Each structure stands twice: as structure tokens, then as C-alpha cells.
Image: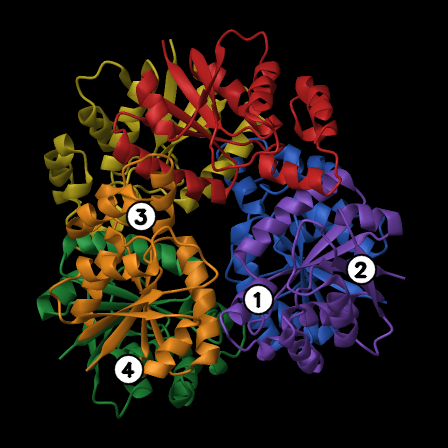
Chain colours: A purple, B blue, C green, D orange, E red, F yellow
Amino acid sequence: MKTCVFAGTFDPVTKGHEAVVKTCLSLFDEVVIAVGVNAGKTPLFTKDERVEMVQKAFVGNDRVKVQTFDGLLVDFMKENGYEINVRGVRNVDDYKYETEMFLYNTDMYPDLKTIYIPANKDSAYISSTALRSLYSAGGDVSNYLPENITEFVKGLLKNK
Amino acid sequence: MKTCVFAGTFDPVTKGHEAVVKTCLSLFDEVVIAVGVNAGKTPLFTKDERVEMVQKAFVGNDRVKVQTFDGLLVDFMKENGYEINVRGVRNVDDYKYETEMFLYNTDMYPDLKTIYIPANKDSAYISSTALRSLYSAGGDVSNYLPENITEFVKGLLKNK
Amino acid sequence: MKTCVFAGTFDPVTKGHEAVVKTCLSLFDEVVIAVGVNAGKTPLFTKDERVEMVQKAFVGNDRVKVQTFDGLLVDFMKENGYEINVRGVRNVDDYKYETEMFLYNTDMYPDLKTIYIPANKDSAYISSTALRSLYSAGGDVSNYLPENITEFVKGLLKNK
Amino acid sequence: MKTCVFAGTFDPVTKGHEAVVKTCLSLFDEVVIAVGVNAGKTPLFTKDERVEMVQKAFVGNDRVKVQTFDGLLVDFMKENGYEINVRGVRNVDDYKYETEMFLYNTDMYPDLKTIYIPANKDSAYISSTALRSLYSAGGDVSNYLPENITEFVKGLLKNK
Amino acid sequence: MKTCVFAGTFDPVTKGHEAVVKTCLSLFDEVVIAVGVNAGKTPLFTKDERVEMVQKAFVGNDRVKVQTFDGLLVDFMKENGYEINVRGVRNVDDYKYETEMFLYNTDMYPDLKTIYIPANKDSAYISSTALRSLYSAGGDVSNYLPENITEFVKGLLKNK
Amino acid sequence: MKTCVFAGTFDPVTKGHEAVVKTCLSLFDEVVIAVGVNAGKTPLFTKDERVEMVQKAFVGNDRVKVQTFDGLLVDFMKENGYEINVRGVRNVDDYKYETEMFLYNTDMYPDLKTIYIPANKDSAYISSTALRSLYSAGGDVSNYLPENITEFVKGLLKNK
């Protein structure tokens, strides 16, 4: 059985993340969505909110598994015996960042296999960072979220 | 069973191609190496030489299958029922080219799944194009070829 | 009255060109589509075919004017008293190329004003060059052409 | 009458901004300089100082109008019935950022027309951000400001 | 006698810095390593720790001289009569940043000569910034430091 | 004595080349301008014309030496005992190309030292390739050539 890991902060989950997970499901038997919990970062949504968001977004799909991790992704993967690291790549800057990380990760975990999933034209410009900016400037981010969590995220945002 | 396709001109096969195929073998059950036979291009090595090169490079591995194709890669994949397209991506320009192709391919074959495999630091600068330039300027390309085809390629080059 | 020039080889006209012209029409009073006739290039479509293609694509719009030019675009513009040069920019490589040209053009014609029109997500990957490759590999390019010239271009391609 | 909007933080106004406005004036009938007032940002110059800076830089030109806006630029433009958004683009990173914004803006305001004005070689490396760094390291930024506000900005900086 | 300056924050010194200094020593008679002391930044290592790190990394080489500077590098160079500014360039983003700085520096100090030293494949992905992130996520950065300061840096990190 | 090599096709010599050589002269004792004579290329100017052009451009400077080479630059450098390879870098694409070459060259000649000289704002957009295009479209290239060869090149062009 092939298991891949798709890690991120998911602050919030976007349609772009959703598309990557769908591709993962057609490539591998199981997808672990690894929600990063970096002490140093101050996300808009709490760890619990982000985990719940991911669970709701992929609810009913028993080949999707949600886990959290702290520290280095490669340490999390090594400890769990995961070897396939899937990265969504939306643009040249994503590509450059991911490739630098890939080189460090390969040094630290030589058995790691890293693959990039390119974004289709409808999600290539959607990033969690941009959605947070859009939200903080008073914009409506609903169209960029997976359809089945739109209401849930709206509810969370009311209390921010 | 998951089968992926890794297509190219392989003019010649390089250590970079070899690394991509190794990663494919750890991700999927079978790898089809699809050797492109574009009428418009004039490769340094003939179609038969390139097919033999690929076969020799991965000889003994029964999960690697070599096929040729003419015309569009997506047409070849559709006709054979292949759905996973693996692309080696060595640098920003590869990334940009592949992503443009990915968008066209997705229009023409919506079921296609495309993934990129980043090059490690030892093969990120190796391209068939650069090796042909190096060769034509009198340089030695042996170090950039898979070890088990070095002698075979040297033999072919003697007659060019 | 403000007149802008949108120049290119239009080999063939694409939906991307069509989108740029539409934006031009909302910005300025008149758009001159300048079809380049470079002796050095060997286009897929003849000069007359390309001119007819542009005319048919924008037929009925009396604010669109079609002209041909040979040699440098800035010389053509100077001779006709045109001062606004509109360039469609689809990606980073277009941007870099156009900016180099902009610097040369500004040296040669200081009164020139150059503006870039970014491509929307549905046409950012469409280029005449890619369409010619797609065609020569046996692909169908119809979806990437302005709707009202699809049949006309198909007819021309039958005789290529 | 065609009105375009040129928005920014103008912290401070630079020769690059001045060049963009000059090009706008040759393209359109009126230029609205929209000074952004983002609660989240802490600019070096106050909102009032930045508005005064812009007014002084283009004083005497009755085709230049200065307004402020908070929140999303597209909301400001919609509310005022403005449809032409002019962006100065100095380099590849500007291009990439603006194109991401263009895609979001087009989703939110389909009637918006966005154009980019490339920077000439003398202002392509001038950004407000770089000038603030230069100033904070003890450098003299005068040469990068519009000539008629050099003294005014020097006066403001004395009190920072 | 030709003296070059290699400036940075060195927070911490990396194998990449070490490689640049080695190249400098084969090009010029003397290398001044200029350790930046920006009041605005909060480095992981103190100024004294960074100076000591640089000294230890190049100990025994009397053609390497360590100095500190505050404010603009060009002011430091002018005051000391230094004219050759060496910059390590690891990737496209370094290149773009350094070239913007080069244009400002040339305006402020026309006699300045700036050269870039490209990173070899083993250090092109090593940056102080990445090492600090790696460290803060619990990773081991030893392999990316000059060998003769590995223990010294480990000792410093114990107290962070 | 430090000798550096500045190699190229010089088809034709430009103000950009002139600026690189001037910087070389302030960095090193001697500059070898190595004029490439690739059998595969068909330059606008003959080998003899290009050599004469370089000689005339730097006439009277006895620290500039002109040589020709065929085949690989690193072979030429090794044979002559040259170790410092200077490359002019005008933009991101130059940077990427040169860095790929640097990696190959380092494999083939580990003692080689490669440095890049960034172009100033007045020559960053000047390339021999662009000048040949400009010329073939009927443009005047004089302003982009070193002043003391303008007439000489004009004379050569009359016979092309």
C-alpha cells in the first residue's frame, strides 16, 4: 500500500489544497494530510479549527487521514515511516521554495521521495496567505474554499 | 496496478533520466518510458539507438517498459489508457515549460494526472541538450550518462 | 482621439489576441492591429491569410483597423504618428522579452508610450507558437482560436 | 472621458511613481492617485503626510486627483465607478505579484481593466521599500524623489 | 595590493560563506570580511559571537581580516578606501536582490566594483536564514557549517 | 600576476562588453579577451572581423590581450594555464545560463574560478543578439557599440 503525505498549515484550507488531495487519491492508496503546528507562527485559525476544517473538507473519504505535526516535516515522516512527500506547486516562487526544501529534506532523509503537483489554471493563484490578506481587507473569500466548508469557515470568521 | 509514463526524446539518456525512473519505480508499479519520435526533430541518435539506449539503461528491471510514440503525448496516453504523466523538472525554465504543457494537456485529456519529480543537486544541471553541445565542442559526456550505458554510447558516438 | 497599436505576427490569431483587443477597445478610441511581415521569418500562414484572419476576427468593429508593417515596429509607429504601443503579456518570459524591447524602443522613439495587458487565466498559456506545435503534432487547435474564425482557419489548415 | 486609477501606499512618492503618472496623463484624461490607508501597516510617513506628498508632487496639474482608500482597491474602484487600474511594474517580482492580484481582482470586479506600465531604466530599481531601508541605514534618498518634493520630504524626515 | 570586501550578517557563518572566501583568496591579495551590525535586526547570534565565528572559521589565514560595520556597506567601504565588493550569489532571487543593491550602490559610490561569485552545487541551497529555520524546528545544522566551527556553534546554540 | 579571461563571440562587440572589460582591468593585472570560433555557428561578422573589432575597441591598452579559441572554453583555459573566468551577466536568463555552464565547467576544470560582473543600467539590455536583430530590421545600432569602433562597424555592415 502506498501512502503519501500532504503537509501544510491549512490556514485556511483552499480549493487548491482540495485539488491536490484529489490528485493524490488517484495516484496513491492513502493520503495523510499533515497539519503543521509551528509554535513560532500565529495562524488566523487555531490548530483545532484547522484540523476540523481539513476533516470536514474531506469527510466521508476513508482514504484520507488527518494528523498533526510539530517541528520538521521530515522528522514526522521518518517517525511514521512515510516516504512520499507531495507538494502542491502553484507558481515559480513555490517551485523555488519547494526545491530548496527538497534539497535539505533529501540530506536529512535520503529515502524520502518528493513529488510536485502543479495547480490547474483555476487554483494557481489561490494561496492561504492571499486569502488571509483578502479577508483582512474586507473581501469575501468563500469562492476560494472547498464548497463543503464554506459555511463552516464563515462561522469561524464571525468570531475573529 | 498503477502505471506511470515518463516521456522524452532521450537524445541521449542521462543520469537525470535515470534518477527520475528510479523515483517512479518507488512510487508506482510500472513505468512506461515513452521515446518520442518527432518527424520534425533531427536527433543526434536515431530512434533505434535511443530505444536501445533506454533498454540497456534499465535492463533487467521488468517493471520498466519501453514504448515509442509519434505526435502528441496525450494522444499516446489516451490510446493506451495511461493516466499518470511524470515529468522531470530540473530548474525554473523546465517548470515553466512543463506547466504550460500541463495546461494544454489537461484541456485535451481531463483525466490525465501530471506530477513533477525535482532533480537532486547532482543532476539538476544535466540535460540532453547541454550534453549534445558539450559533445559537439569536443567535451567528454561520459560522467553524465547512466553507468551501464557509458560504453555503448561511446561506441555510437564514434560513428557520428 | 487616442489610437493604440497592437502588433504581432498573428500566426495564427488566438483567443489571447482577441482578449487584448477587447481590452484595448475599452481603453482607447481606436486600435490599429499591425501585422508584422518579417522577410526573415517563415510563418505557417501567409501574410494575406494572417491579415484576413485578423479582419475576420474583428469584423464589424469600425474602431479596429488592420495594417501591415515590415522592419521595426517603432519605425512603423513613428511614420504613422502612433504613440501608444500595447503589448499582451502572458507570463514572466513575455514580460522579460517585452521589457528589453521597451528599453530599445524608448531609445529609438522617446515619445512612445508602452503598456502591457496581462492575460486572464484562460488565455495565459495560449501562444501562436504553442498552437503551431500542437497543430504539427496532430492536435486540434480550434478551442484556442476566436470563435468566429474557427472554420476559416480549419479551411486554411486543410491546404497546409 | 477616461479616468484611470493609480493606487499605492506612496511611502514615500518616488521618481518611479512620477514616471507612471506622466505616462497615465498621456494615455487618459484623468488620473486618480489613490493613497492606501491600511490599518494593518505602519508606514514611515503618516496618511496626511503621504497625501500631501502626492499633492505637492503633482501640484498644478488639474488632471491629477488625489483620493484615499481603505480596504480593497477593487471595492474603492467599484464604489467610485472607476474601471481602469494602472500598475507600475518594475521587475519580474512586481510582475508576478501584480498578476496574482489581477486574477483576484478580475474575479471580484469583472469590468475592471488592468494595465501595467513598465519602468524605464532609470527608475526600474527604485521602490519605496528600498528607499525606506536606505534612509534607515543613514543613506540619502533625495535623488530618487520627484524634484519638487525633495525639500518637503527632507523636512518630514527631520522629525522621524 | 588588491583588497576585496565580503560583507554579510553571518548569522551563522555557513559552508557557502566559506566557499566564497576561498574563491576570494584565489582572486585577490586580501579579503575583508565585514560583519554587519544592523541595529534594526535581531540576529540569533550576537555581534561578538558572529565576529568570533568568522575569526575561528578562517583562523590562521593572515590574508583574511575581520571588521564590523554599521549602516550602509558603501559608506563603510568608502571610509576605508575599499573598492571591490564581492557578493555570493546562490540563486535567481539572490541575483535579483544583489543587482538592485548594485544599482543603488553604484549611484552612491561610482568607483565601486561589484562581482558575484556563484555557489557550487553543494552550497547553492545553504543560507543562514534556512539554517536558522531548520534549527528552530529542531533540526541539526552541523553539516552546513564550516568544519572547524561546528563544535563552537553547537556550544553557542546550547545557550539559546 | 593575475590574468582573467573574458570569452564570447563578440558578434559584434557592444558597450556592455566594453564595460565588463573596464571592470576586469580594475580587478586584475591582465585581461585575455577570448574570441570564440565555433564551427557550428554562422556569425554576422567573420572571425577576422570580430578579432579586429575587439582589438580596435581596446587599442592602446597593453593589459588587454586578444586570443581566439575553438571548442570548449575550459579546454582553452586549461591549455593556457588561465584560471579566472569572467562572465558578464545582464539579466536573470544570463544568470541561469551562466550558472549551468559554471557547474559543467567546474566538473571539467576544478581549479577554475568563475566570477560574474553585473551590467549597469545603461548596458543591461544590450546584447549582440538583439543588435543583430535590430540591424536586420533596418535599425541603427551605433549607440550600443563602443565609441571608437562605431565607424569601423558601420563600414563592415555596408558590405553585409
What is the CA distance from the residue labelled 2 to the residue labelled 4? Answer: 49 Å
What is the CA distance from the residue labelled 4 to the residue labelled 1? Answer: 32 Å
List the residue tagged with mark 4: C26
Q: Please state which amino acid type lies under the numbered disc 3.
A: Ile
What is the CA distance from the residue labelled 1 to the residue labelled 3? Answer: 28 Å
- Please name which of the two marks, 1 or 3, marks the residue nearer to the observer: 1
Residue B92 coordinates in the image, percent (x, y): 53, 51
Task: Name the foreground residue: D71 vs F119.
Answer: D71
Q: How many marks?
A: 4
Do marks 2 and 4 share a chain?
Answer: no
Among the 4 quarters of the image, the one containing residue E17: top right
Residue C48 coordinates in the image, percent (x, y): 26, 78
**Given contact means CB atoms under 8 Å apart, are the residues at marks 2 and 4 in contact?**
no
List the residue tagged with mark 3: D126
List the residue tagged with mark 2: A4
The chain containing the residue under callout 2 comes to: A
Q: Quadrant of the C terminus of chain A?
A: bottom right
Q: Is residue C82 above or below residue D145?
A: below
**Given contact means CB atoms under 8 Å apart, are the residues at marks 1 and 3 in contact?**
no
Could you tell me if residue B117 is visible in this image? yes
List the residue tagged with mark 1: A132
The chain containing the residue under callout 4 comes to: C
What is the CA distance from the residue labelled 2 to the residue labelled 3? Answer: 45 Å
- Please name which of the two marks, 3 or 4, marks the residue nearer to the observer: 3
Do marks 1 and 3 share a chain?
Answer: no
Q: Residue at x 18, y 21 (%)?
A: F59
Q: Please state which amino acid type lies under the numbered disc 2.
A: Cys
- Please name which of the two marks, 2 or 3, marks the residue nearer to the observer: 3
For marks 2 and 1, the one nearer the N-term is 2
Q: Residue at x 39, y 13 (%)?
A: F2
